[in-house]
Amino acid sequence: MRTLPVLPLRDAVVFPGTQLSLIVGRARSVAAIGLATSGDKQIVLVSQRRSEISEVGPGDVYDVGTIADISNCLELPDGKMKIMVHVRDRVRLHEVADSPSFMSALVQTIHDEPGDPERMANLVRSVDEAVEQYVSLHHAAPPDMVSAVRRIEKPGRLADLLVGAVKLTMKERQRLLETLDVHQRLEWIHQALAKEIEFLQVEKKLRTRVQRERDRREREVWLTDPPRSEGEGGTRPAGRAEAPQDEHAELLDMLRAKALPAHARARAEREVSRLEKMNPMSAEATVVRNYLDWVLALPWGVDEAAPEPPEHPEQVLAERHFGLQEVKDRVVEYLAVDKLTEDGQGPVMCLAGPPGVGKTSFARAIAAATGRPFVRIALGGVRDEAEIRGHRRTYIGAMPGRIVQAMKRATSAYPVVLLDEVDKLSTDFRGDPSSALLEVLDPEQNGAFNDHYLDMDFDLSKVMFLCTANNLGAIPGPLRDRLEIIELTGYTEDEKVRICQDHLLPRVAKKSGVGLGKIQLDDATCRAIVRHYTRESGVRSLERQLARMARKVAVRVVEEGPGVEVHIDVQSLHDWLGPRRFDIKGAEGEGEVGLVKGLSVSSVGGAVLDIEVVAIAGKGDLKITGQPGTMMKESAQAAMTWVRSRASVLGVAPDVHEKTDVHIHYPAVPGGVEGPSAGIGMVTALVSALTGRPVAGDVAMTGEVSLRGRVLRIGGLKEKLLAAHRGGLHRVLIPEENLPELSELPDRIRAELEVVAVRHMDEVLAIALAPQEGGQARVSSGEVAKC
C-alpha cells in the first residue's frame, strides 16, 4: 500500500490496459498532476459518484479506481492540462486525504479472481463468436476488431477491452470495474453484446424494408411515366424533382460560356447527358459533378492571349535577385525568341546548385519578368506516378495529378510552373513519377498531356516549366536529357555582402516588425558575419543570423520605445550573435607531414577536405576511413600503386609494401566522401608520410591521378576554388585541362588566388612538398563531400 495523488473523473470510468488522453481544468486536479509528474508519474483515476459536483471530497468518489502512468503532460494556453495516461491496475482506496491543494489516497492494488478454466474457455469462445457477429452487423466497427480480440489471452483483459464496444451506464461500468470475478464480468459483457446484436439485427431489417419500398416506388414511377424523348425536351424521367434539371441546364450554360477545345466540349456534354439520367443522390452522380467542376475550372487557353512581359525584363530580374547573370541572360533570350516566333517553347531550364543560392526565389523573379502567374509544385518525397498523372475515376476520392491541379491554381494557360526539388523524387511499387514527368517536360509531347482523371488531352505547351535540384546525379538520365542544366555555384564574399545589404537585411527587418531604419549594419559588419558566423555556398544561414539580430532589436524597441536605432559594428557582434563559429585559418603555419588540404564539392557546395596519412610499422596493409565511397577507395589504391612504382625516385623504402601499414583518413566529413578528384591529394599525403617531408601549409589541391601519374580533369572547379578562398588558402593546384573554367571565377577571386595548373604528379610534389620538415599548420574541417 502507498499514498498517491487522486484525479477525480466526471462521467468516465477507465479500465486497466487502456491508453487515453485527458484534459484537466480544475485547480486541485492540476495540482495533483503536478505532484505526480514531479515524482514517479503515477496517479489514481477514480470516478465521481455525481458528475455535477465541482469541489470533490472523499465521500464523492468511489472506493475502486485504477492506477495510471502519466506518459506525457502538456500545459494548454487556457491554463488547463492535457495528459496522456496508460492505465495499469485496479486499486482500492482505503484512506482518502482531502487537503486544500489536492486529493490523495492510500491505495492497494487488487487483482482478478480466476474462475474454473473449462467454464472460462467456453465463455471466451461464446464471446468471440458474439464479437464476430457484432462486427458483421455494425458498419462502424473496425474490421480488425475480431483478430484483436482473439489475440487476447487473459479473459479479464478481454472483458476490460470490450467495455467500450457496448452501451453501458456509468453505474454499470463502475460495477464492472469493482467486480473481480472474471467469469461474472465476462458474462455481463456477453449479455450486453447479445442486446447490441439484437438491436443491430432489427435495425438491419428496417433498413432493408425501407430500401425495398423505395426501389418499388421508383420502379412504378418509371413504368407509369416513361422517359421523354429528345423531341419532348430531354431524357429526364417524369416524376423527378425540377432541381436536378435546373442544375443540368446551368451546367450546359456554363459549358457554352466556357472556351473549350472541341474534344473537351464534346466529352463534357456527354458527361452532362449521363448526369441527367442518374439518380441525383447516387455516388456516381457526385463523381460526374466533380469531374465537370474540374473541366470548367481549368484554363484551356482557347481564347486566352499570351501575357505581355514588362518592357525591360532584365531590370525586373536585377531588382529582384542579385547575381546569376547566366540565368538572367537565358530568360531574356527566351523572351526574345517568344516575341519573334509564334511558338517560343524551348528547353526546360533546371537550376541546379547548393541550398540557399536562391533557386526558388529566382524562379519567382522569372515569373515577374515574364508577366506570368507563378505556381510551385514541391516534388520532394513524391513516389507515386498518380501524383503526376492523376488517379483514374474508378477509385474513390480520385483527383487529377499535381500538374493539372497547378494549372487550376494558376487560372491561366501561360503560367510559370516550378517543379521544385526534382532530384528528390522516389520510386516504389506504385510507379516511377520521374517517368511521368518525361511527357510533361518534352516540348514535342506536352501539347497533348493526358491526365488519368481528365482522360483527355490537355495542352501544356504554353507553360514555362522550371526545375530546381541540388544533386544532378540523382536525376534519372532520360529526364535529365530533357532539361537545360544551368548550374548555380556559390556566392563570393563580396556578393554575399551586397545581398545582405540590398535584400536580406530589408527582408528580415520587415518580418521582425522593426523597420529597416532601426537596424544599421555597415559592409565590414556584414563581411564579419559572413566570415565568422556562416560557412555555406548560399545565404540561408546568413539570413538566419540577421533574423536573430533583428529579433533582439525588436525586444529593445519594445522595452525602450519606437525611437530606438541600433548600430551594430564588428566589435559588438559578440553581444548579438555570441562567439565566432568559424575562423579563417587555412593558410597558417608551414605544414605537416602526411596532411594535405584537398577540395571537394557536393550538393551543399564546395568545402576544404583534409586528407591525413600515417605510416606505421606493419605488414603492408592499406586502411581507408572517413566513410569513403567505392571510387574513393579505388583512387587510394591507384595512388598507392603509383607511389610504389616510383619508390626509388621519391625516396620511399622499396619494402614499404611489406613492412609498413598505411592509414588514410578523412576527418570531419559526416556524410562520407566519394569521387576520384582527391587522387593527387592522396598521392602527396602518401609521399609526405613515407618520406617525412612536410606538405606546404598554404597549398590546396584537386585532381584525379592515373596509374602513370597524369593529373586528369575534375568537375565542380568553381565551387572548389570558392571554398579554398573562403578557407583562407592562397595557392591551389588544379589539372591543366580545367584551365578554361577559370574564366567563370569573379575577377577579385582570381586576383587573390594563385592557381597553378599541373599535368603530372612530379609537378605537384615539387610544389607541395618542402625539402625539409616545417612547422605544423592548423587545418580547416571539411563538410559532406563529393570529390
Image: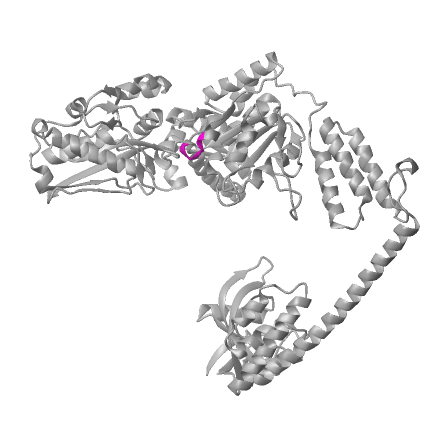
Q: Nearer the viewer, residue 773 or 300?
A: 300
Q: Position of residue 643 (x, y in %)?
A: 14, 31
* The quadrant where residue 52 appears: bottom right
Q: Is residue 418 magenta?
A: no
In this view, the residue farthest toward the front is: 223
Q: Could you say where residue 145 lies in the image, as x and y percent from the top left? A: 59, 67
Residue farthest to the bottom, as pictured: 116
Please, is residue 470 above or below residue 155 in the view? Answer: above
Query: In the image shown, does 76 or 639 lie closer to the viewer?
Result: 639
User: Who's the residue at 67% across and 43% down the image?
Assistant: 393
Q: Which quadrant does the C terminus fall into? A: top left
- Chief secondary structure of the magenta span? helix
Return the residue nearer the eye: 315 or 619.
619
* Quadrant of residue 740 within the rendered picture: top left
In this view of the protein, can residue 523 be seen by the observer? yes
Going 83% across and 41% down the picture, which residue do you hit?
247
x and y percentages locating residue 668 in the rendered image: 29, 41
Number of numbered labels in the structure image:
0
Question: Residue 315, percent across and down?
Answer: 54, 18
Q: Which of the 4 image quadrants contains residue 485?
A: top left
The chosen color scheme is: one colour
Q: Residue at x 13, y 27 (%)?
A: 770
Q: Residue furthest top?
A: 340
* Region rendered in magenta: 473-477
> In the visual, does 72 lie left or right of 252?
left
**Residue found at x 65% / y 21%:** 307
Q: Compared with residue 293, is residue 162 higher up or lower down, i.e. above or below?
A: below
Q: Foreground: 284 or 671?
A: 284
Can residue 694 be seen here? no
